[in-house]
């Protein structure tokens, strides 16, 4: 897929694309992370009017992008072109929740979250608070 022929995404599509990117970042796709994405889409107000049939389209876009050497850069360009800045921290929080969902944040996920903080210009202190929230929400007994 040529990067100049990327489909038009909605803001919720962008949030889902980033969550999927976190999930597939290391090649392993834990069920708990997919369930977390589905749960976010089903319950969070930002996805209230979202057409869930678009999830497959967005997932396929992410898979296609990740097959290219500059796919991650293209994804972030697409996100910055589409997603309102006011939703950058929301995107980061959703991705932290997905990464923490299986109780184990892997190195590839940490690197992608770090890249996301940089690409979306998320304040370090805000990022730390978001990460802490994700960690405590996903503790197990």
Image: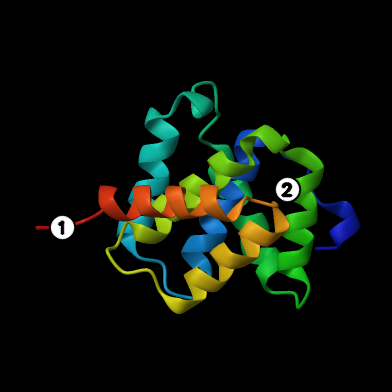
Q: Give coordinates of residue 82: x percent, y percent.
A: 77, 39
Depth check, front residue: 13 or 137: 137
Q: Earlier in the sequence, mark 1 or mark 2?
A: 2
Asked if the residue under mark 2 is in contact with the one under mark 1, i.e. CB atoms within 8 Å, the reply is no
Position of 101 with respect to 26 (left or right) is left
Quadrant in which the C terminus appears: bottom left
Specify whether 41 is left or right of 121.
left
Query: How did the renderer colour the structure?
Result: rainbow
Circle 1 — which element? loop
Identified at 58% across, 66% down, the residue is 114
Q: Residue 46: x and y, percent?
A: 52, 27
Residue for point 44% across, 49% down: 129
Residue pictured at 29% horizontal, 62% vertical: 102
Location of mark 1 (residue): 140
Q: Quadrant of residue 69?
A: bottom right
As rendered, which of 69 and 91 lies closer to the eye?
A: 91
**Distance from Cα at disc 1 to Cα at disc 2:** 33 Å
Q: Residue furthest left?
A: 141
Q: Residues within 10 Å of mark 2 (few under 14, many from 20)?
A: many
Residue 8 in view (yes/no): no
Q: Is residue 68 visible?
A: yes
Q: Which mark is residue 79?
A: 2
The quarter of the picture where the N terminus appears is: bottom right
Using residue 43 as the reference point, say whether residue 72 is left or right of it: right
Q: At which x and y percent is residue 54?
A: 59, 39
- Whole-percent x, y for residue 4 in the image: 90, 56
């Amino acid at each position: 897929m040529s990067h100049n022929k990327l489909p038009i995404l909605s803001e919720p599509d962008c949030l889902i694309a980033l969550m999927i990117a976190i999930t597939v970042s290391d090649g392993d796709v834990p069920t708990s992370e997919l369930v977390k994405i589905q749960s976010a889409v089903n319950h969070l107000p930002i996805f209230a009017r979202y057409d869930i049939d678009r999830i497959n389209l967005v997932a396929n876009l992410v898979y296609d992008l990740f097959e290219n050497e500059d796919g991650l850069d293209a994804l972030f360009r697409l996100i910055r072109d589409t997603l309102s800045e006011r939703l950058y921290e929301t995107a980061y929080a959703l991705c932290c929740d997905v990464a923490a969902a299986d109780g184990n944040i892997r190195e590839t996920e940490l690197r992608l979250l770090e890249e996301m903080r940089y690409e979306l210009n998320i304040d370090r202190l805000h990022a730390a608070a978001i990460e802490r929230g994700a960690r405590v929400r996903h503790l197990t007994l």
